[in-house]
Structure formats: C-alpha cells, structure tokens
Amino acid sequence: MASGATITTFRNRSWLLTFFVVLGALLMLQGVATVVYFLVFGQADFWFAVAINGLGIAIIGIGFWFAAYGWRRLRDPQPPITIGPDGLHDRAISARPIPWRDIANLQVWNGQGGPVLAFDLAEGAGERAGVRRGAHVSAAISRLSGHNYHIRSMGTDATMARLVEAIRPYAEIRGE
C-alpha cells in the first residue's frame, strides 16, 4: 500500500436521488392509505387486519428510508463520498474523514443499488471522526452481516472499479 496524494470524489446523480425522494413519498402515501383504509373501512378478520396494517407500516418505513436517503444526499452541496490520504469520508456517516488507521476489515461488493463498502472501526474512531448517531444505530443492526459500517453508493457515480482504484493506494481490501 503506497502512500499517495490522489483524492477521489464521487458525485451525486441528482436525477436518481430525485427519483428516490419521489418513490419514497409515493410509498409513504400508499402505506398511509392502506392503514387508514383498513382502520376505517376494513371489516376483515382480526389477524388479517393486523397483517395488512403491519405491511402498510412497513411500506411507510421503506418509503421514509428512500425519501430520507435521497433528500439528505440532494440537499448537501459537498461531494457525498471522498477517498484520499486523509481517509474515507461519507458525509452521511461522519462529519470528518475516517483515517485509514482506524478502518479494519474493509470489503467492497456489488449490492442491489450499486457498490457497497463495508468496514469496521477501531476503538474510539467514531468519536474522532464525528460519526453520526444514525450511523451508530445502523452499525448495531449491520453487525448481523459481519461489518459495523456500510457506505452505500446508491445515487452516486461510484462504480466498483473506481472504488477499488481509489482505495487501493491507502488500504487493503479484503477478499479482493
């Protein structure tokens, strides 16, 4: 791993993020309509009504996730993901770049929405990099998949090849 001065920034694809916001809003609307309909007009069996309302609430949650993700990326004027000698910086995860020395078990794979970068953080790294509260909560859930933190490139111009090329001078990628 050679030290270099190359900084790679990944940009938003605004049209795709706008699609996520609209899709999320429509999903939330559908979920609310489903729940309201079955609460007001539903004369279904109790367990069927519970299942339908549960699905409606799940649709609202999925819609909220898409809309919030798109909105957060769209309203931030800075590049969403930056990789360079100072470390790895996803503005949705941390306020400052996470130094390479604090990143362990780095792995990249193709996910359903594009490349996913997964890694673990050293003790105290979250506080030093200003990892956001939502990222800490997400990391607790992500531990089930074997990594604490995930950078999702959905809505950006990141490709698998560009991510690997940007990271390679600074860190070892597991399973490459």
Image (cartoon, rainbow, N blue to C red):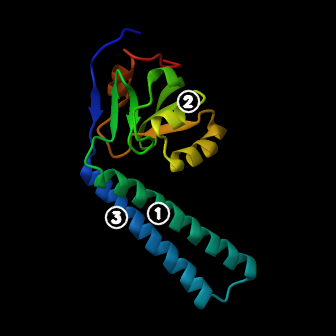
Residue nearer the viewer, 127 or 158: 127
For the residue carrying disc 3, how many other residues have a C-alpha within 10 Å: few (<14), some (14-19), or many (20+)?
Answer: some
Q: Going by the image, does 35 lie left or right of 23?
A: right
Find disc 3 in the rendering and name its residue.
22
Query: In the displayed image of the protein, which residue is found farthest to the top?
Result: 2
Q: Do tag 1 and tag 3 residues touch (Cβ < 8 Å)?
A: no
Find disc 2 in the rendering and name its residue.
121
Q: Earlier in the sequence, mark 3 or mark 2?
A: 3
Find disc 1 in the rendering and name its residue.
64
Residue at position x 33%, y 35% from top?
158
Q: Amino acid at mark 1?
A: Phe
Q: Quadrant of residue 164?
A: top left
For the residue carrying disc 2, how many other residues have a C-alpha within 10 Å: few (<14), some (14-19), or many (20+)?
Answer: some
Tell me the CA gap for discs 1 and 3: 11 Å
Establish if 22 lies above or below 106.
below
Q: Nearer the viewer, mark 1 or mark 3?
A: 1
x and y, in percent, of residue 29 in the image: 44, 74
Can residue 41 be seen in this snapshot? Answer: no
Residue at position x 51%, y 73% from top?
31
Residue at position x 45%, y 22% from top?
100
Can residue 66 be seen in this snapshot? Answer: yes
Q: Amino acid at mark 3?
A: Val
